[in-house]
Image (tube, rainbow, N blue to C red):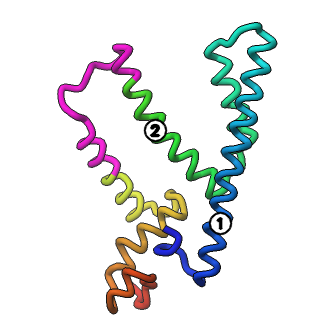
Amino acid sequence: MTFLFKSGSFREKLKSIAQATYTHSRNLAYFVFTYKGLLAAQSRLQGKKIPFHSFLAACIGGWLVFGDNNPINSQIIMYLLSRILFGLARLAVEKGYIPQPRQDPFPLLAALVWGTVLWLFEYHRDTLQPSLQSSMTYLYEDSEVWHDVSDFLIYNKRTDSK
């Protein structure tokens, strides 16, 4: 993604990737250490492990480790949110809170997600995360101008104005 959608030299792109990888792995390590430590402390204090311990430890760890609103944390949180929503939907069906769908709801979900994101991109672009804006600009606007295959393989920077 960095090579396709970001500008800068090859060296700058590699440095950006290395820094993002380091920050991502460091934050996950800090979170795991904090979470496991808080779980152990709660279990020791109460003499047993209860389900709320997991939630509380994760909330505290999330606040401390991922509370800084930066591009890496934002990506991690959005990744988790999408998985949580799927998990909660499955749990709601499993517990009987909502009926089992008669057919696979995924095609409808895909349609709504793509319809919404393109509508936001076209009419409320500033509400989207900067990296998504950049990717979508490349795919849906910069791609309108082609010089040769290198535009796709290297980087296609829009040269004309609308």
Q: Amino acid at mark 2?
A: Arg
Q: Earlier in the sequence, mark 2 or mark 1?
A: 1
* Side of 100 where 4 appears, left or right: right
Residues 46 and 60: in front is: 46
Q: Estimate the x, y position of residue 139 in percent, counting from the top left.
A: 37, 71
The residue stretch that appears in magenta:
91-113
Residue receiving disc 2: 83
Q: Residues within 10 Å of mark 1 (few under 14, many from 20)?
A: few
Dot 1 falls on a residue whose secondary structure is: helix
Asked if the magenta segment contains residue 29, the reply would be: no
Determine whether 129 is above or below 14 in the image. above
* Side of 121 where 105 appears, left or right: left
Residue receiving disc 1: 18
Q: Estimate the x, y position of residue 64 in percent, counting from the top left.
A: 75, 40
Q: Amino acid at mark 1?
A: Ala
Q: Estimate the x, y position of residue 32 in percent, counting from the top left.
A: 69, 37
